[in-house]
Image: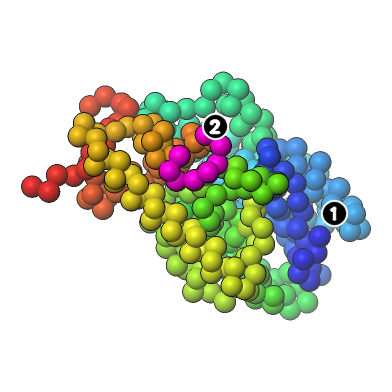
């Protein structure tokens, strides 16, 4: 649907959750924001473009908001259908977006060595299937650039790290629409029927909080993420506040839990104990808290509030003594 003049929302699913990709249809350039999972260009994006009288060759540029399978897994299929399409992303995410093995090592399997937490074989296979074939990125953004889509329509590229180091959001000054990808996540991901499905999955806590502050400082009239209902006017501020409150609550719950554990707790124990208090997503989704809670542990160590105990993995954490 064209929810703002020349900005189309292409809606699909990733598992049971909504997936919202965006196509900006300029007179000079067509820009596709994210390519979905590996099969999504063929099953979702190209059919939508045909419906509005366009085709794959009308995608002049792909902007990947960040390195995740549901945002860049379709890069190879888009490039395959239109070799002229320029594949772009945030500079810091480039190595992960270009190479599924690097994405696995540095993102999805980053918690095995220190925390002993990893996906089972079926999970690993599903991740690689969704990531598709490796696809070089043509060039990258650092944030602060603009892109001319033609007819005086210029969009802005904003750096919004926290869910990934190179995360981007795109602002359309004409309509006040900010396309945020997964830069801010509220307190939950909902499924297609509106029921809680998944915990937030940000990683770098300080960067994430700064991104929330940054977005609050901008004149956003409409916030359009990749998995959440569109937020208009006052809902924008509420969603940003909800995102910040979730982070603060997670910090508090971790510290409260560690206060009860004189011998410390591992990341897995914290996920099991804190998870049910943090949100009402299904218990089966709790393991996905590994991303946010690992981020919080790093954040609390840096803030001098907790200590990582030395010894063999999995790492254990305790409150820092006040002596
Ligand atoms: Zn996503």
Residue drawn 60% across the image and 42% down it: 197
Q: In which image quadrant can residue 151 be found?
A: bottom right
In this view of the protein, which residue sits in the foreground, 119 or 264? 264
* Residue at mark 2 to residue at mark 1: CA–CA distance: 36 Å
Residue drawn 47% across the image and 27% down it: 118
Q: Which mark is residue 284?
A: 2
Magenta region: 276-284
Is any part of residue 251 visible from this angle?
A: yes
- Asked if marks 2 and 1 touch (Cβ < 8 Å), the reply is no
Q: Position of residue 240 (x, y in %)?
A: 51, 64
Q: Position of residue 284 (x, y in %)?
A: 54, 32
Packing grade of label 1 (10 A; few <14, some 14-19, many >=20) is some
Residue drawn 49% across the image and 36% down it: 286
Q: Position of residue 300 (x, y in %)?
A: 29, 48
Quadrant for the N terminus, please. Answer: bottom right
User: In the rendered view, does 116 fall on the left or right side of 196?
Assistant: left
Q: Position of residue 265 (x, y in %)?
A: 29, 33
Secondary structure category for the residue under label 2: helix
Q: In which image quadrant can residue 321 be found?
A: top left
Above or below for 265 versus 242 = above
Q: Which mark is residue 280?
A: none
Q: Which residue is mark 1?
A: 49
């Amino acid at each position: 649907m064209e929810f703002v003049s020349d900005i189309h929302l292409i809606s699909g699913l990733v598992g049971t959750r909504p997936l919202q990709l965006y196509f900006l249809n300029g007179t000079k350039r067509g820009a596709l924001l994210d390519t979905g999972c590996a099969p999504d260009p063929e099953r979702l994006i190209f059919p939508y473009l045909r419906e509005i009288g366009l085709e794959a060759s009308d995608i002049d540029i792909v902007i990947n908001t960040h390195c995740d399978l549901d945002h860049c897994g379709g890069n190879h299929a888009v490039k395959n259908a239109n070799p002229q399409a320029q594949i772009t992303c945030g500079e810091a995410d480039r190595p992960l977006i270009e190479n599924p093995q690097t994405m696995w090592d540095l993102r999805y399997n980053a918690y095995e060595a220190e925390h002993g937490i990893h996906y089972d074989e079926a999970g690993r296979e599903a991740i690689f299937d969704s990531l598709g074939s490796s696809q070089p990125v043509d060039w990258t953004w650092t944030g602060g650039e603009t892109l001319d889509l033609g007819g005086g329509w210029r969009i802005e590229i904003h750096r919004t790290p926290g869910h990934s180091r190179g995360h981007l959001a795109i602002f359309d000054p004409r309509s006040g629409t900010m396309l945020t990808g997964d830069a801010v996540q509220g307190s939950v991901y909902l499924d297609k029927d509106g029921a809680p499905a998944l915990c937030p999955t940000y990683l770098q806590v300080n960067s994430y909080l700064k991104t929330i502050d940054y977005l609050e400082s901008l004149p956003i009239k409409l916030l359009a993420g990749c998995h959440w209902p569109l937020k208009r006017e006052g809902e924008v501020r509420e969603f940003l506040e909800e995102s910040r409150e979730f982070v603060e609550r997670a910090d508090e719950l971790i510290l409260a839990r560690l206060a009860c554990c004189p011998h410390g707790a591992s990341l897995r124990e914290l996920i099991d104990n804190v998870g049910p208090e943090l949100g009402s997503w299904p218990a089966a989704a709790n393991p996905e808290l590994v991303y946010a809670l690992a981020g919080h542990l790093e954040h609390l160590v840096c803030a001098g509030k907790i200590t990582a105990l030395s010894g063999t993995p999995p790492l254990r954490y305790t409150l820092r003594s006040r002596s």
